[in-house]
Image (cartoon, grey):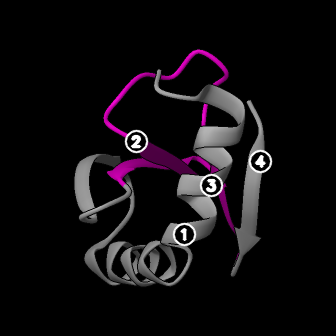
């Protein structure tokens, strides 16, 4: 479960056996979410409020190239 980025207390990661479409998991304390990387689309969320989800979306948009590159490095076309 490689951690790709930690920013503002949010940990962005994916699982070693993840699948397409390219997506990123996010956690902070007991809160979790999953977003498609591009275009940024929320797939599911547990306990994050709308303000937090907006902040997470912005972080993903700002780091989408990093997330896609790390996905391809670790998972290829999975």
Q: Residue at x 33, y 84 (%)?
A: 51
Residue drawn at x 37%, y 75% is: 57
64 relative to 42, above or below: below
Q: Residues within 10 Å of mark 4 (few under 14, many from 20)?
A: few
Q: Are marks 3 and 4 in contact (CB under 8 Å)?
A: no
- Image check: 70 left or right of 30? right
Give the percent coordinates (x, y) of residue 37: 38, 57
In the rendered structure, find residue 69 and report the number of the disc placed on it. 3
Q: Secondary structure at mark 3?
A: helix
Q: Is residue 1 above or below residue 44?
A: above
Disc 3 versus disc 1: distance between alpha carbons? 6 Å
Mark 2 or 3: in front is: 3
Region in magenta = 9-36
Q: Residues within 10 Å of mark 1 (few under 14, many from 20)?
A: few
Task: Decide which of tag 2 and tag 1 comes sooner along the chain.
Answer: 2
Tag of residue 65: 1
Q: Which residue is mark 2?
A: 22
> Disc 2 to disc 1, how far (Cα)?
12 Å
Say if 48 sits above or below 61 in the image.
Answer: above
**Are the residues flagged by discs 2 and 4 in contact, CB closer than 8 Å?**
no
**Residue 27 visible, this angle:** no
**Residue 27 lies in the magenta stretch:** yes
Marks 4 and 1 sit apart, C-alpha to C-alpha, by: 15 Å
Quarter of the figure with the N terminus:
top right
Callout 3 touching callout 1 (CB < 8 Å): yes
Asked whether the beta carbons under mark 2 and mark 3 sit within 8 Å of each other, the answer is: no
**Is disc 1 placed on a helix, strand or loop?**
helix
| Helix, strand or loop status at disc 2 | loop
In percent of the image, x 41 and y 44: which residue is there?
Answer: 23
């Amino acid at each position: 479960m490689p951690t790709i980025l930690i920013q503002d207390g949010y940990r962005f990661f994916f699982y070693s056996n993840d699948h397409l479409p390219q997506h990123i998991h996010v956690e902070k304390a007991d809160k979790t979410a999953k977003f498609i990387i591009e275009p940024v689309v929320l797939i599911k969320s547990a306990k994050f409020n709308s303000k937090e989800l907006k902040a997470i979306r912005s972080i993903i948009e700002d780091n989408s190239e990093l997330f896609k590159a790390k996905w391809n490095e670790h998972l290829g076309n999975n």
